[in-house]
Image (spheres, grey):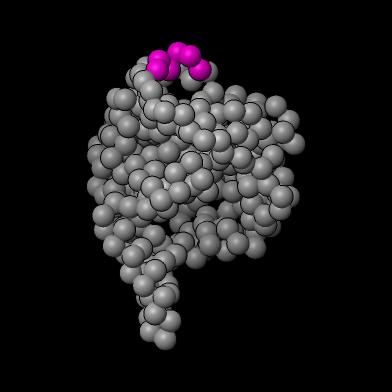
Amino acid sequence: MSTTSFLNSVAVTKPPAPASISASVHAASGCPACHAELAKRLYEVKTSSTFQVMKCVGCGLVYAAPRPTPEELQTFYSSTYFTRDHQTNLGYANYREVAELNARRTWKQFHKYVPLERVVRRKLLDAGCATGGFLAEAKAAGWDCLGVELSDHAVEIARHEFGLDVVHGDLNANELAPGSFGLITMWHVLEHLIDPAAALVRARELLLPGGMLFIELPNWNSLGRVAKGPAWKQLKPPEHINFFTPRSLASTATRAGFRVLRCNSHYPSMIDKAAVRRWSQPLHCGVALVAIMASAMGRGGYVRLLAERE
């Protein structure tokens, strides 16, 4: 499948009535998280081709089928993914002006969620590090840092502009030695992967005993998804092909051999706005309050998980 065909705008058709069907009718070999064969069809989404959005009867993971091939993903995550045409809904219009800056700011917020003083070794692996904004901040803070990234375009920027040590590939790259890392981060990575369960098993192998894993990704149970249904902006295969809830993410991590320390949802941007306390803008504050309440009820826009290798 070509990059051009991947980057067509997303059009959503009217969802069919939910029905239990066998996963054997499409390209996925069962649920990508628990490998159960039975799933409910929720929606039909059209991008470059037609995708069925399925919900696993076993663990509750929502996923898109058919699954893209590794070759298709390699083509998709080329330079155009980070500087896409404004007529499409996939990728980034300008990653470096928005997402890279956000990645840098995230390092300060990260300390509030992860007790870095408890990390067994100050060696960090950032999986799916993109151009390296988060990794650069960690390195500046004195951490021994390594990144892994599928996009050769992003790897070149991380290496030559930021001087970072970044491996071109995925978590199975030979350069990654088992039992080497005290902390692995996955910022918006698992929703993109063909086999997210295998990625978590591999992450456990790469961590030292007692090492920590941090994950953030879109929340299928979010207030936005419940309100918008098949028009939810995160529902865009083949870019996003896995959709977790706090419960399904925690269970997947547990099966991979992790002990879950924290797993909850949040609306980071809205909560940040609430902290500004712009009382002169009642609507602004009202939206922020709704976001805080939604996060407390598990309806936040993102899921965050912190776990450790036992």
Residue 64 within the segment the image draws in magenta: no
Q: Is residue 54 left or right of residue 128?
A: left
Whether residue 59 is visible to the viewer of this picture, yes or no, is yes
User: Quick one: quadrant of the C terminus?
Assistant: top left
Q: Is residue 167 left or right of residue 277?
A: right
**Which residue occupies the foreground of this view, 30 or 305?**
30
Question: Is residue 301 shown above or below 242?
Answer: below
Q: In percent of the image, x 41 and y 66: which residue is there?
A: 270
**Which residue occupies the foreground of this view, 303 or 280?**
280
Q: Residue furthest top?
A: 24
Q: Which quadrant of the figure has residue 273?
A: bottom left
Q: Is residue 174 left or right of residue 223?
A: right
Q: In percent of the image, x 60 and y 33: which residue is there?
A: 46
The spot of residue 40 in percent (x, y) is: 38, 25
Q: In percent of the image, x 44 and y 44: which residue is there?
A: 229
User: Quick one: quadrant of the N terminus?
Assistant: top right
Question: Is residue 57 shown above or below 246?
Answer: above
The spot of residue 73 in percent (x, y) is: 62, 32
The spot of residue 226 in percent (x, y) is: 38, 47
Q: Which quadrant of the figure has residue 166?
A: top right
**Which residue occupies the foreground of this view, 78 or 232?**
232
Residue 25 within the segment the image draws in magenta: yes
Give the tally of numbered discs: 0
Question: Is residue 236 shown above or below 290?
Answer: above
The residue segment tinted magenta is 21-26
**Which residue occupies the foreground of this view, 268 or 136?**
268
Q: In percent of the image, x 29 and y 62: which residue is there?
A: 293
